[in-house]
Amino acid sequence: MSSFSRFLPWFISICLVGFLVALPLGTQSQLVLGVVLIGALLVVWRLWPGPNQRLMMMSIGTLLVLRYLYWRATSTLPSTSDMADFIPGMILFAAELFCIGMLFISLFVVASPLERKPARRLTDAELPTVDVFIPTYNEDVHLLSATLAAARALDYPADKLKVYLLDDGGTDQKCTQENAVEAAGARRRRAELMSLCADLGATYLTRQRNVSAKAGNLNNGLAHSTGELVVVFDADHAPVREFLRETVGHFRDDPRLFLVQTPHFFLNPDPVEKNLSTWLRMPSENEMFYSVIQRGLDRWNAAFFCGSAAVLRRAALVEAGGFSGVSITEDCETALELHSRGWNSRYVDRPMIAGLQPETFASFIGQRSRWCRGMMQILLLKNPLFKRGLSVPQRICYLSSALFWAFPFPRLTFLVAPLLFIFFDLKIFIANSQEFVAYAVTYLIANMILQNYLYGRVRWPWVSELYEYIQSFYLAPAMLSVLLNPKKPSFNVTEKGVTTNRDFLSSLATPYFVCFAVLVVAMGYAGWRYSTQTLDNDLLVVVCIWNALNLALAAVSLGVVSERSERRRNQRLAVNRSGRLDLHGGSLPVQIQDASTTGARVKLLTPGIDLPDGEGLPVGRLHVETLDGQSVTGGIPVIVRRTISEPDSLAIGLQYLKPAPQHYTIIAELMYGQGKPLSDFWNLRRAGKGLLRGTLMFLRMSLRQMVRGLQFGWLALGQTRADEPEPSALQQRKPDTGGSVTPFKTAEG
């Protein structure tokens, strides 16, 4: 077939789309067209399942978006004769162009998410040698103990598996620094972690100087190890037992495969989920990325390294000179370098690690600020559009991942734009209310339908907008700092493993209250204008609706920055395992209902047992049966913290009593002996919400969180330094004392 014959259908399609986009229609006709196309979207979604449904949905939605864009560019821009209107008008138009461009890029990325088949199971003789790297800087030893024990318990031949703890908190530079107190602390840390590694059968590694942050630490691990494959787990990411069996087989299928990435799964809510009490019922924020976008990237051989829960081929890393450290997001940068060298990647959509998210809003913003600055660095210093060796789809995919983090620009623009008309009567969007409904409203509805179709099971309506809103105030200056000096950002470690013992207002709350107050004043002033003027009232109504949507986001944000106490000191996982409890000189069969790294809840299977009610007594030992029915050697010393009467039995909340390293081996077997509990909870929250239900739910949430946030703000006015927690409000995690049975145990549970 000639080149002309191949491209003729595409040429005809482009011409047809161009004709439909530029077709001159009156406002009423455009409204009818918009309603018809929205109806077509709903009909295709609900009544036309099949392999072509996704393409049809995208095609119809794209037509409406392009109709809006053509009208916006040709009929609504302010005149250059009035620069006061023209300049902000063009900024608003640029923000819209960015959003529409990102929409089209994202549609390309997720056009056909890959459903990857499981890797073939290899015999022990076929299995490659594996080095597990656990980089650490300042994490608590108990956190590291659980991760190390889980890594050592991986289902893999012992002679082919070696676990390394890469300690950047005990380097020679840290141990010999001028500050005597900090130097002594670094030396104590080194000694403690060396002893821990010796007890758990891991290898301790540190280095002379803290150069190139995490990338440098990982490269030091490469220099002192020899395994064919390298696995990276963050210090708080404990793997389930089958992790390697489910991943390493992919490397035998493709000799040019450099990466198998798996999703990051978390035992605790992020601050938004915690403070809004949505943890047990709403899909986590990261599920949209891991369950849809990463699978879409995988279709184009562009799934990238996410810093943890991944397996990499040593030969590929050596060829590229190790982990890249030019930016502070060494993971995505490393994947970019290796993809450009012709190496391949795969994504396995199965949760097989359990990690921790930042517990406070301030640490959450610090983490996202690092991600934003790092991706902006990649965009500026290693622009994927001009990176040699990448395919066109890979360029688009990496561009999508990097440009996403520029969302503060459009988000803040959309926040300010209606205020310019309300307060200053600036005409930055030239249209009447009928035109706005016919073009803009139909475009926005189609966009939301398309987003709900593509991501509905893993992202509720308006949640993306909320996350962007709450991050934009602090990510905007972070993004600007990189634009001014791309090489300036430095790596910061996200604090984890802390908890809050009381409610308090975040130290970052001020911008959200100020913005909320401005939006409320704007609504009042707009109402006054409507009642006293006769011109532009229809447009004023449209702008007020826009401002009201911003106000709803601002109201919810007040709840986000109003920190709830976290009474659950260690997040617990529903495990449903058999065991026995040595107590009162006897041995009682129990069902272990859930467990954490510091405690467990067990159900007594023997009726009529009488236990004293209260905390602290008696002391016993908990034995865990492995999945094949054998009892793990030894047992964990426990103390009874509480008894819970159930209709037909008695449950006991147990606290581990000063667990030693060998006890963490049992804890790891109990919590991470199988991946099913993680997958069960992963799927439990995937209950989508339609646009109408989701919007109504969000509006109700905005009212509740507005009241709650204002209460916090009012109390803060009467307190000294009330916007910061007292030193006692933030604590390292303390022992768990058991509680009610839910899939995961949190303060809500």
Image: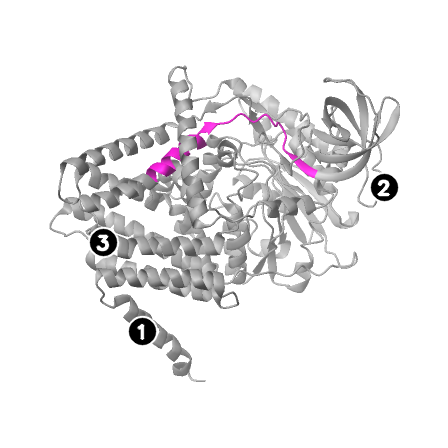
Residue extending farthest to the left is: 81
- The residue that mark 2 highlights is 630
| Image coloring type | one colour
Residue extending farthest to the front is: 647
Q: How many marks?
A: 3
Q: Is residue 593 magenta?
A: no
Q: Position of residue 428 (x, y in %)?
A: 20, 47
* The label number, if any, that marks residue 15 in the structure image: 1
Q: Is residue 565 magenta?
A: yes
Say above or below: 210 vs 402: above
Which residue: 38% across, 75% down?
10
Say above or below: 2 vs 685: below
- Quadrant of image for the C terminus: top right
Name the residue nearer the viewer: 203 or 147.
147
* SS at circle 2: loop
Q: Position of residue 194 (x, y in %)?
A: 70, 32
Three-letter code, disc 3: Gln
Three-letter code, disc 2: Gln
Three-letter code, disc 1: Cys
Name the residue nearer the viewer: 373 or 429.
429
Q: Earlier in the sequence, mark 3 or mark 1?
A: 1
Name the residue nearer the viewer: 145 or 273.
273
* The label number, if any, that marks residue 434 in the structure image: 3
- Label 1 environment density (alpha carbons within 10 Å; few <14, some 14–19, many ≥20): few
Q: Earlier in the sequence, mark 2 or mark 1?
A: 1
Rounded to the nearest angstrom, the CA distance separating label 3 from label 1 is: 29 Å
- Quadrant of image for the N terminus: bottom left
Q: Nearer the viewer, mark 3 or mark 1?
A: 3
Rounded to the nearest angstrom, the CA distance separating label 2 from label 1 is: 70 Å
Q: Position of residue 44 (x, y in %)?
A: 45, 64
Q: Which stretch did the figure color magenta?
A: 550-574
